[in-house]
Image: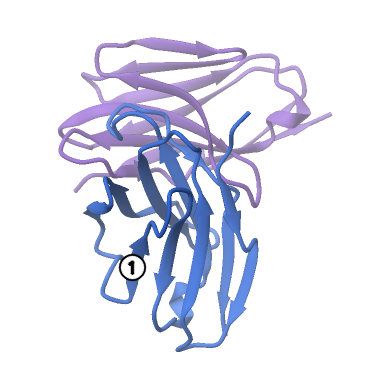
Chain colours: A purple, B blue
Amino acid sequence: KNQVEQSPQSLIILEGKNCTLQCNYTVSPFSNLRWYKQDTGRGPVSLTIMTFSENTKSNGRYTATLDADTKQSSLHITASQLSDSASYICVVSAQAGTALIFGKGTTLSVSS
Amino acid sequence: EPEVTQTPSHQVTQMGQEVILRCVPISNHLYFYWYRQILGQKVEFLVSFYNNEISEKSEIFDDQFSVERPDGSNFTLKIRSTKLEDSAMYFCASTLASGLVGTQYFGPGTRLLVL
């Protein structure tokens, strides 16, 4: 069964600190992996998209990595800001169709 | 910057009633999607739509659901006879490129509450 698992479920960090969020997936065949940021009560906003041939992709203070062999991805946030407080969702697309498979997300809280 | 819009932002309805959720995708996008998110749970795919027909749908998207693109701008999701378990946030998304690679832009969502 195609699944996306994320850890930790929630995380609290101090403003200015770095953090890394993890994603493991069992989706097969694999097309691409995306990280989305979702503020409470809002729609997800795309941060990065990576295909199987890409190992890393950055978007400002967000850096995503992908290991297609171990089926793992991470999202690293540097110099966190209060506005980074949100849910970060790992989303995988299988080659067979267009449906996106969502993880449950990691809830990040950045405090001052 | 172009964005996906959805109306209404909130809707309360009685069980058994029909509801229509409306979306205006980004104007030059070709692929359209509906997702739902039950409170506290993950986002779930409902249906994708391309070239005026459904290209893929999930098990959730049963006969009670239908989608339509009635004109060049709107994309609607209809639930014919709502059930309590249909209470959720419904997101519309659109993308320019093929859904396999293209970035999907999400709307702000419609929060549906079925009583």
Relative to A101, does residue B103 appear above or below in the rendering?
above
Image height check: is A72 above or below B49? above
* Location of residue B98 by image quarter: top left
* Count of marks overlaid on the render: 1
Q: Is residue B11 above or below residue A47?
A: below
Q: Is residue A108 visible?
A: no
- Left or right relative to B14: residue B28: left
Q: Furthest-front residue in view?
A: B71
**What residue type is disc 1 on?**
Ser
Residue toward you, B72 or A94: B72
Circle 1 — which element?
strand
Looking at this view, is B42 or B69 the one in front? B69
Where's the C terminus of chain A, which quadrant? top right
- Residue at the spot x=51%, y=65% of the render? B21
**On the rendered structure, is B99 left or right of B94?**
left
Say which residue appears at 77% left-offset and 23% top-offset.
Answer: A15
The x and y percentages for residue A108 are 63, 36
Residue at the location (35% across, 19% down)?
A50
Which residue does the numbered mark 1 point to in the structure image?
B66
Residue B16, horizontal then vertical, whole percent:
45, 89
Q: Check the residue under mark 1 and report the chain it is in.
A: B
Q: Is residue B29 above or below residue A102?
A: above
Query: Left or right: where does residue A63 sit relative to residue A15?
Result: left
The percent coordinates of residue B75 (x first, y second) are 44, 55
Q: Which residue is drawn at the image coordinates 54% and 41% (left, top)? A: A44
In the figure, residue A72 lies in which quadrant?
A: top left
Residue B73 appearing in the image: yes
Counting from the top left corner in percent of width and height, residue A52 is at 25, 18
Farthest residue in the right direction?
A112
Badge 1 local density, few (<14 within 10 Å), some, or many (20+)?
Answer: some
